Amino acid sequence: MHDFPFDRLYKHCESRFLPEAGRKLRIGTLSDYRTHENEKVRDIAEGKFFHTLRFDGSRLIRKSWLSDICFGVPGISITGIGEARNNVAGGIFVGSEVIGVVQTTDDIRTIEFTADAVRLEGSLNIEFEGCDAFVFCISTKREHGSVINDDDYDACWSISADDLGEFQRRMAISLISKAEGIKEETIGPVVSPPFDPFRMLGDPSPSLRLHPSFSKIIYRSKSALISEGTEVSREEIKNLLDCSARTKPLEFESESEYRFIFQPSLVSSDGQRMVPLPNYCEARLIDCEPFLDLIRIE
């Protein structure tokens, strides 16, 4: 028996895409859903998170706090009083769920600085983008129009909560069987540090693995304003960044969805070391046949 607060989950789609022999099941990605052709399911910040620090110059800010809250990669260059700078800096962020790039941009004027603190005026913007991953969303709602208010989405299929583990296992197998064209990649926003998983792993014969997870989507704002003097810790911001792959804006809350996530990684031949493949994923069509015995057409 399962421990979920539901008995079945439902996938809404166009009737021509209902699972049956000879048809394909579409698996999206975080980056894919930022530019999805259907604007009603598009989230331009999928897998990303932003926060802004604003300073009015009224008090000294500890440099150690500033560096900590920016994960050690602030773009601020404090070289002289009255100097206005527009900088970009990036660095790798490693969380418990995701790995990605933190980039900072700023429009800051330095009013005063000491060995340990600085008085600033302006804003510092921090953007996080995680490694891409395969994603598949499915809802607790069965009623037509309850998830996507689109007349074209006129059909629905479901899966029992008891079969979710097996469904996840088969999906991972179907995706890994499509593994091809692995190459060196970079990750992140427009400006980012090089990210070469092959060099980082240092193994001439790595294997490709998908690391699956399944959880309820968190619906909340994907941006956070941190005004001067706000008591916020690095750990609080880290937690927001870390669950970005399973976070969606509040405007999607009515969808009431859960999400399968499959994160691709390179694993060393001895199985002891792993690094993510940042941009390996792309939306894919996989055969429906392996799933038909688990699916019920509603």
Image (cartoon, rainbow, N blue to C red):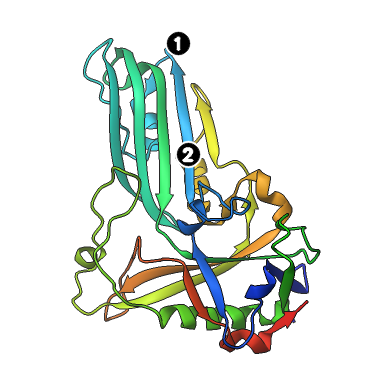
Residue positioned 66% across, 77% down in the render: 18
Image spot of residue 117 (x, y percent): 34, 20
Label 2: which secondary element: strand
**Earlier sequence position, callout 1 versus callout 2:** 2
Q: Quadrant of residue 88?
A: top left
Q: Which residue is mark 2?
A: 50
In the picture, which quadrant includes the C terminus?
bottom right
Specify the amino acid type for callout 2: Phe
Q: Which mark is residue 240?
A: none
Q: Is residue 227 above or below residue 195?
A: above
Foreground residue among 165 and 33: 33
Q: Which mark is residue 58?
A: 1
Regarding residue 211, the answer to whether it shows in the image is: yes
Image spot of residue 157 (x, y percent): 72, 75
> Which residue is situated farthest in the right direction here?
143
Residue positioned 73% across, 59% down in the render: 151
Q: CA distance from mark 1 to mark 2?
A: 24 Å
Residue positioned 50% across, 72% down in the render: 212
Residue positioned 65% across, 63% down in the render: 258
